[in-house]
Amino acid sequence: MTVLYFLDLLGTLVFTISGTLAATNKQLDLFGAYFTGFITAIGGGTLRDVILGTTPVGWVSDTNYIFVITLGVILTFLFKSLIMGLRKTLFLFDTIGIGVFTIIGIEKSLSLHIHPLLAIIMGLFSAVMGGVIRDTLCNDIPLIFRKEIYATACVFGGILFVSLNHIGLSLAINQFLTISCIIIIRILCIRYKISLPVLKH
């Protein structure tokens, strides 16, 4: 098990918890909560693989993802109040998750000889589209369309990854630097309340 694979599973777990919490806040039943957690965790990667034409999609060929998603839903139902008290920890894991998902999306795209610019977009889709589907299902404005720096951090990280890959930097070092870049950008933006300008009518 590589570090990136472990972090991918960890990101899947946190995204599942995020989706399940959103569903319970909307008072959905167990199936609704499981479905929302499931689609939050695998939605971005599934959309990426469908666009790239790679089948079977990632989670279909690895049952560990189903086990992790199921675990995430169970943990949320059993320990919701405890989890709600760990928001800072979940925020950190969520940020690690979007960093890992961004890298995985870019790496998979580049391995299929996709143009680097489009690979960055695929990395972005991998990281944020699950959350977009979650928010849409819960009748909320998706997080990436609000003021918080979220998708932008993934884009900057993706540009860094593609640039370092182009000059031939070691993959492991590139992965570490890119994930760190995304984490630092998001934390700093939250800490200092940095956001993109809002369009006003």
Image (spheres, grey):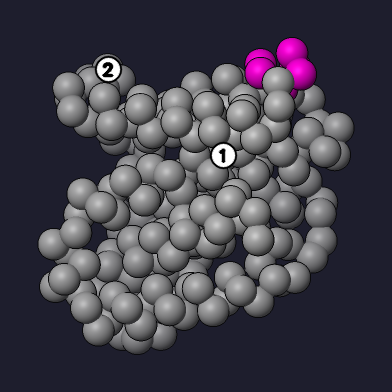
Determine which quarter of the picture holds residue 74. Answer: bottom left
Amino acid identity at mark 2: Pro
In the rendered image, which quarter contains the N terminus?
Answer: bottom right
Estimate the x, y position of residue 175 in percent, counting from the top left.
60, 34
Q: Secondary structure at mark 2?
A: loop
Closer-to-camera residue (120/162): 162
Vertical order, 31 against 49 (above or below): below
Estimate the x, y position of residue 141 in percent, counting from the top left.
31, 47
Residue at position x 32%, y 46% from top?
92
Vertical order, 50 against 106 (above or below): below
In the rendered image, which quarter contains the C terminus?
Answer: top left
Closer-to-camera residue (153/160): 160
Q: CA distance from mark 1 to mark 2?
A: 24 Å
Residue, disc 2: 197
Q: Secondary structure at mark 1?
A: helix
Closer-to-camera residue (38/61): 61
Residue at position x 43%, y 79% from top?
71
Residue, disc 1: 102
- Which segment did they paint magenta? 163-168
